């Protein structure tokens, strides 16, 4: 158990008026406990109370495993498949002084279970995801260093990928190459988007099958975990050459990225950072194609607070790490993105963690090709 983070969550609960927070299996439970059991339809989760004490509720089949993982300091209550789950949980909540109280839930809490418990035990369930993100939004010195090292792995692999990308390779082959090279450098978790040609116009494309063609654009968006700290970067690669039109679009994206990063300083108003990128893109009327926020926080997961968007009325603070990733997406036609991870370090300085080249990168150039 990460006791210091449990205590921080308990303090935040007092400020928010929550009597407890339910953390169901998933990445958030792993963050607080160091593990996460298999998730199925049976209700289970860690309850953290406002006084900092914890208990776990699960089906009988998970009981011994949870007791072994959590140790003697955390009571584990079980219910059996032949029992009525809500009856058993109702008794546990009454014993713990939580019946009729307000309980926050994390991002993986299952609505069908939570609704049944709310009805049976007169519980008011609330969204606790912002509290859980607040617990870890300010990175420690150690976490900051691991973020730097995770970004360095992604940077190194990009240079290797430039030699691998060529006509005839599939998106999946490039993705597998990225995975293999990140793991070879010590990454414990890897993820990637490789989108070529018109597929690059879909920001969260998930395919693998398209074959790279001469005169293609290949969008790489990938990262890894190093000591639990994630990296996330995007670069746009041009196969064969870059046309004048593509160069104009890329210049716009690069300047949008630079404009947002220039504002990303301690005390900066987050909505202004998103706005700055869109103002550059709108020089060509393309802000409307940026259908996502301009950035997201990063750390123990790829997407966490702070979210760099105009609906987040907050200022940047020391220890925050986040992406800046403007792009242009013309559906079914063309797409490109430039993403760096930026961190406000412990001294209040702005660090751009990704050092990969920002200029247009051309591979397998075709002699005489200019678009």
Image (cartoon, rainbow, N blue to C red):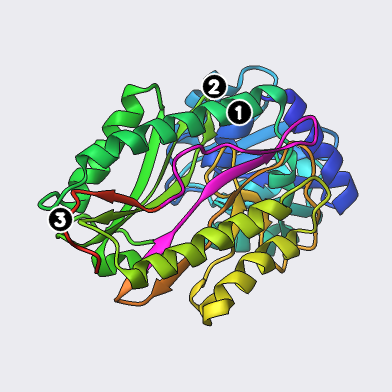
Mark 3 or 1, which is nearer the eye?
A: 3
Residue pictured at 68% horizontal, 25% vertical: 2
Over which residues does the magenta segment extend? 335-359
Q: Is residue 59 above or below residue 101?
A: above
Question: Between 163 and 198, which is closer to the camera in this rendering?
Answer: 163
Mark 3 or 2, which is nearer the eye?
A: 3
Question: Which one is earlier in the sequence, the residue at label 3 or at label 1?
Answer: 1
Instruction: Determine the residue located farthest toward the right in the rendered image.
Output: 15
Mark number, residue 69: 2
Q: Look at the image and say whether residue 206 sits in the magenta stretch.
A: no
Cβ–Cβ under 8 Å for marks 2 and 1: yes
Q: Is residue 287 left or right of residue 308?
A: left
> Does dot 3 land on a helix, a strand or a loop?
loop
Query: How many other residues sit within 10 Å of disc 3, few (<14), some (14-19) or many (≥20)?
Result: few
Question: Between 353 and 283, which is closer to the camera in this rendering?
Answer: 283
Q: Look at the image and say whether residue 342 sits in the magenta stretch.
A: yes
Query: How many other residues sit within 10 Å of disc 2, few (<14), some (14-19) or many (≥20)?
Result: some
Residue pictured at 14% horizontal, 60% vertical: 213
Mark 2 vs mark 1, CA separation in Å: 8 Å
Mark number, residue 367: 3
Mark 2 or 1, which is nearer the eye?
A: 1
Quarter-wise, where is residue 266 in the image? Answer: top right
Q: Is residue 133 left or right of residue 202?
A: right
Judging by the rendered image, the residue that carries numbered circle 1 is: 33
Question: Which one is earlier in the sequence, the residue at label 3 or at label 2?
Answer: 2
Q: Position of residue 100 (x, y in %)?
A: 80, 56
Mark 3 vs mark 1, CA separation in Å: 57 Å
């Amino acid at each position: 158990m990460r006791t210091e983070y449990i205590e921080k969550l308990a303090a935040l609960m007092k400020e928010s008026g929550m009597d407890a927070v339910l953390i169901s299996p998933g990445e958030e439970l792993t963050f607080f406990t160091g593990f996460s059991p298999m998730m199925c339809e049976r209700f289970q989760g860690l309850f953290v109370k406002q006084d900092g004490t914890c208990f776990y509720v699960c089906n009988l089949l998970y009981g011994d495993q949870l007791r072994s993982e959590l140790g003697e300091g955390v009571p584990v209550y079980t219910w059996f498949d032949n029992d009525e789950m809500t009856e058993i949980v109702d008794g546990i909540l009454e014993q713990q002084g939580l019946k009729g109280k307000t309980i926050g839930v994390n991002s993986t809490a299952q609505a069908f279970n939570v609704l049944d418990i709310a009805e049976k035990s007169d519980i008011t369930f609330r969204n606790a995801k912002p509290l859980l993100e607040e617990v870890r939004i300010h990175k420690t010195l150690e976490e900051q260093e691991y973020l730097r090292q995770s970004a360095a792995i992604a940077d190194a692999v990009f240079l290797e990928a430039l030699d691998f990308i060529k006509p005839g390779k599939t998106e999946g082959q490039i993705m597998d190459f990225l995975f293999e090279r990140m793991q070879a450098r010590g990454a414990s978790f890897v993820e990637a988007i490789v989108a070529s040609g018109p597929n690059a116009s879909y920001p969260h494309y998930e395919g693998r099958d398209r074959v790279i063609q001469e005169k293609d654009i290949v969008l790489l968006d990938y990262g890894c975990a190093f000591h639990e700290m994630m990296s996330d970067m995007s670069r746009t690669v041009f196969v064969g050459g870059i046309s004048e039109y593509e160069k104009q679009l890329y210049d716009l994206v690069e300047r949008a990225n630079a404009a947002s990063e220039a504002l990303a300083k301690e005390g900066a108003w987050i909505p202004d950072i998103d706005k700055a990128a869109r103002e550059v893109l709108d020089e060509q009327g393309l802000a409307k194609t940026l259908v996502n926020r301009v950035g997201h926080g990063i750390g123990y997961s790829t997407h966490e607070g702070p979210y760099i968007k105009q609906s987040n009325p907050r200022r940047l603070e020391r220890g925050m790490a986040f992406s800046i990733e403007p792009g242009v997406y013309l559906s079914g036609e063309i797409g490109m993105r430039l993403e760096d991870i930026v961190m406000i370090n412990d001294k209040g300085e702005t660090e751009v963690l990704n050092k990969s080249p920002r200029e247009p990168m051309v591979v397998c150039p075709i002699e005489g090709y200019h678009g």
